[in-house]
Structure formats: C-alpha cells, structure tokens
Image (cartoon, helix red, strand yellow):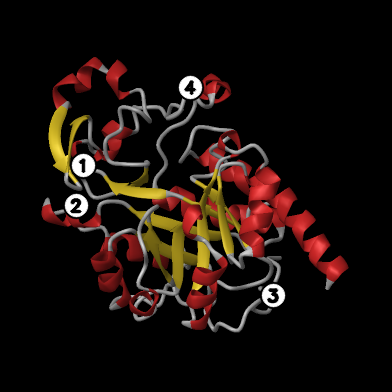
Amino acid sequence: MIAPVPAPSTGSNHGLLTGSPQVIGHRGASGHRPENTLAAYRLAVRMGADAIEPDLVPTRDGVLVARHENEISRTTDVADHPELADRRRTKVVGGREVTGWFTEDLTLAELRTLRAVERHPAMRPGNTRYDGLWAVPTLDEICALVHHESRRSGRRIRLCAEIKEASYFASIGLPVEETLLEVLARHRLDGPGGRSQLQSFEEDALRRLAEQTDVPLVQLVDEGERPDVARVATYASVLGVHKSLATPDLVAEAHASGLAVHAWTLRAELVPDPHAEVRDLLDAGVDGLFSDQPDITVAARAEWLAAQERTG
C-alpha cells in the first residue's frame, strides 16, 4: 500500500508542503544516468527521491515526451540517423536561433527509433556508457512509472512536470496544456492533492493552467531575477527558484504569502561540499530541492533532520 501523506510541515494550506523537505529527482537521477529516461527516473526513486521531474515537449503528432528541450541533437543519437538528415532545421525558439532536429518535426514513431545520450559528456563521462540504451519516454510511460514505483516502494511518489516553451508550441499549433491535463487525468494524477505539480518559467502558461486545473503550479525563476512574490501567489502554489535566490528572506516572504519554495538545481560535481549546500538551503527554509544526485541529497537531508532533532 502507498503510505499516507503526512501532515503539512508549515502553516501553508498547499498540498505540496507535506512531510520533511522534498527531494526531487531532477530529470531523474541525471547525475548517474542520461537525463529524462525511464532508467533515470526509476533510479531517482530507488535512491529515495520523493518526486521525479520530467521536461515535456510535444512530437509532431502531439504526444508529450521527455526531453530537456525540443532540439534533440545533444540528448539523442538523431545525427546518426541518415533517414532523418533532411529534418535538420534552423528555428527561433524562445528568442534564440537554434539549429538541429526538433521533436515537433518528428512523429512519435520516428522519435522511437532514436536513443538517449548523455547531455553533459564532459562533466559526466561515466554516464556515456549508457548512451544508446534507452528510448525517449512518453508522459504516459512516466505516469505509469510513478504508480509502479509508488506501489513497489510503499511511498507516494510525486510527479513534478516542467512545460518547456509553451508559447512557442502554441504558436505552431501544438498547445501542450490540454494534452498534459488529459494525460494526468487518465493516470489519476490530477487534482489538488499533491500527486503532481506543473511548472514553467512562463507566467502566461501557468495562468492558463490555473483556469483549467487544481493541480498545484510552480513559477520557475532563473538566476539573477527577482520574483514578485505577491503576484506569483495569485496563480501558483510554489516558487521554484535558482538556488542562488533561496535566501532566508525570500523564503520567509514566500511562506508569508502562502507559497512553498523549491530550489534548483543541486549538482554535486559543481560544489566542493554537496552536503553543506543542502544544509544551507534547508537552513534557509526551502521546502524542496531539485537534485541531479538524489542519493547525496537524501543523505544530507537525513543528516540535517537528525541535527534538527538533536537541537530541537
């Protein structure tokens, strides 16, 4: 049986604030396996992550799949497929000119002929040994994995899905919001109870979703920006900020407005002491941590909770 959701850990009434600070497998356990693959998501759960985070983009036939962005030359072996050579394009996406192969130019059947590869081979050379092993997963498959891993682990695993470039896809006739909500409903992962959350950097996309669903929404905020907490609280439940923004003052302001705060992204390769980074963010009061190495973050959280118990 799936374990019951524990009582909220803060005064907020948002369903995501449950239990100890959440560890979210960022694109799965992407420090250990190529990101946004079923293997990476499964490993994240088995390392103790409370949730997994896929990035979602559509295919030409409107199926939502997990890739970091719609241009897939860095995350698949598409360049090795001569039958798809004529699909290489240059486009403007999110204000940037991008050249490569794009999910919206491939049907799901065509995308299924590709295999995932490590996006950061220089930083994670060990992950390259898995290149070519796994297909690009669909959102349906990821939702099924959430249910399977919840049953297997006896924990209520959550889904934290990021919508990529929503405005761009709407402009080319592939709006993703309705499809996303249909898939969540089909897998009984919709509703306000905290089984899933939807996140985006685009405020307009989140506002559209707020009119259609009770699923908690997350406003993502990039490094160097200053979020308008009061405004975000009118349509979202969570503020998802770059870890450099997760100061005690910002967290307190967000909590006072009824928002949870998630910090992204913890990458063990980029800091001298990953456990200290986790402690600092938890001391600041964050409610969730996006991590490429969930095993490290789960262990550091356990140490922090034990210290809190000793001193509390």
- Marks 2 & 1, CB-CB < 8 Å contact: yes
Counting from the top left corner in percent of width and height, residue 222 is at: 37, 54
Amino acid type at image mark 3: Pro
Spatial CA span between label 1 and label 4: 28 Å
Q: Quadrant of the N terminus?
A: bottom right
Counting from the top left corner in percent of width and height, residue 110 is at: 27, 32
Spatial CA span between label 4 and label 3: 41 Å
- Marks 1 & 3, CB-CB < 8 Å contact: no
Q: Is residue 194 above or below residue 49?
A: below
Q: Nearer the viewer, mark 4 or mark 3?
A: 4
Q: Please state if 121 lies on the left or on the right of 283 as rendered.
A: left
Circle number at residue 169: 2
Look at mark 3 in the image and give the residue it sits on: 6
Sequence-first tag of 2 and 3: 3
Look at mark 1 in the image and give the residue it sits on: 104
Residue 183 in view, yes or no: no
- Marks 4 & 3, CB-CB < 8 Å contact: no
Q: Is residue 284 above or below residue 236?
A: above
Spatial CA span between label 1 and label 3: 41 Å
Counting from the top left corner in percent of width and height, residue 265 is at: 51, 48
Sequence-first tag of 1 and 4: 1
Amino acid type at image mark 2: Phe
Q: Nearer the viewer, residue 212 or 283?
A: 283
Residue 77 in view, yes or no: yes
